[in-house]
Image: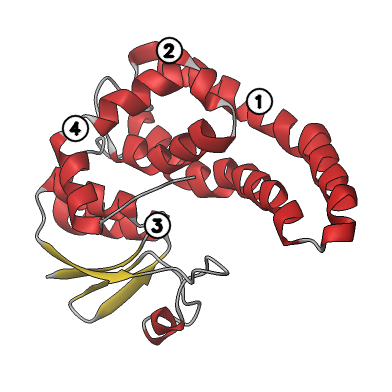
Amino acid sequence: MIIVHHLENSRSQRVLWLLEELGIPYEVKRYERDAETMLAPPELKAIHPLGKSPVIEDNGAIIAETGAIFDYILQTYAGGRLSAPAGTPEARKLTYWLHYAEGSAMPPLLLKLVFMRMPEGAPGLLRPLVRLIASTVQQRLVDPQLTTHLAYWESELARTGWFVGDGLTAADIMMSFPLEAAASRGGADKSAPVMDFLNRIHARPAYQRALEAGGPYAYA
């Protein structure tokens, strides 16, 4: 059985959702973030040297990185479900979104989070200066990137409401985390196509079962 090393409030929630959509049995081992640093606990380093989540174990294999985990599950267990026929434009598009989600979408969202929180950790006397610097970086560098990505998502979702084809695929599950993060801190809460997408996926029974399996999930 697949073991999912699941960190609270993290990308690994997508792995649980993928497994639920496919009806694949799995076991969850939960880890809590450090209350002060919000980082993963050191126990995860016993599973993988980077000490991050998600990580899965299956038949003696340790697989890390969300995209690699998705590839493994789709190739090993999916039987073509939530995917597209090999060699088709849809298959190439699905592969693209599996890589884009972490490679392009998440970096500006992570920067947004870092600069939003930066003033909180600054000494009292320096806090106004740090707040000014953080705000400037967001306005000049981060926010314009997020605006570009948001427009891209809207144009893609406007076609069918999904990222590949006319129904749910692994691409939509992979893209759920960037869109949830953007709705929380990147301005996507004002985008009708994005919010419609999120409302539809959040209503899915498999998504709800994944939340029950993984525990509290706040993507802010």
- The amino acid pointed to by label 3 is Thr
The quarter holding residue 67 reads: bottom left
Q: Residue 18: where, in percent of width, then height? A: 24, 48
As drawn, 113 above or below 180:
below
Q: CA distance from mark 4 to mark 3?
A: 21 Å
Q: Secondary structure at mark 4?
A: loop
For the N terminus, the quadrant is: bottom left
Identify the amino acid type marked 2. Ala
Q: Nearer the viewer, mark 3 or mark 1?
A: 1
In whole angstroms, how far apart are the C-alphas of marks 1 and 4? 28 Å
Task: Decide which of tag 2 and tag 1 comes sooner along the chain.
Answer: 1
Q: Looking at the rendered structure, which numbered label has been put on residue 204? A: 4
* 80 with respect to 93 (left or right): left
- Residue tagged 1: 147
Sequence-wise first label, 2 or 3: 3
Give the answer, above or below, for where 149 lies relative to 108.
Answer: above
Query: x and y percent of residue 183 in the render?
Result: 49, 31
Q: Which tag, 2 or 4, sits closer to the chain's start?
A: 2
At horizontal 18% and vertical 51% (from top left) the residue drawn is 212
The residue indicated by pointer 3 is: 66
**Compared to 38, does 42 lie above or below?**
below
Q: Secondary structure at mark 2?
A: helix
Residue, disc 2? 158
Secondary structure found at label 1: helix
Task: Judge left or right: residue 207 versus residue 181.
Answer: left
Distance from disc 2 to disc 4, alpha carbons, whole Å, reads: 20 Å
Residue at 67% of width from left, 52% of height from top?
117
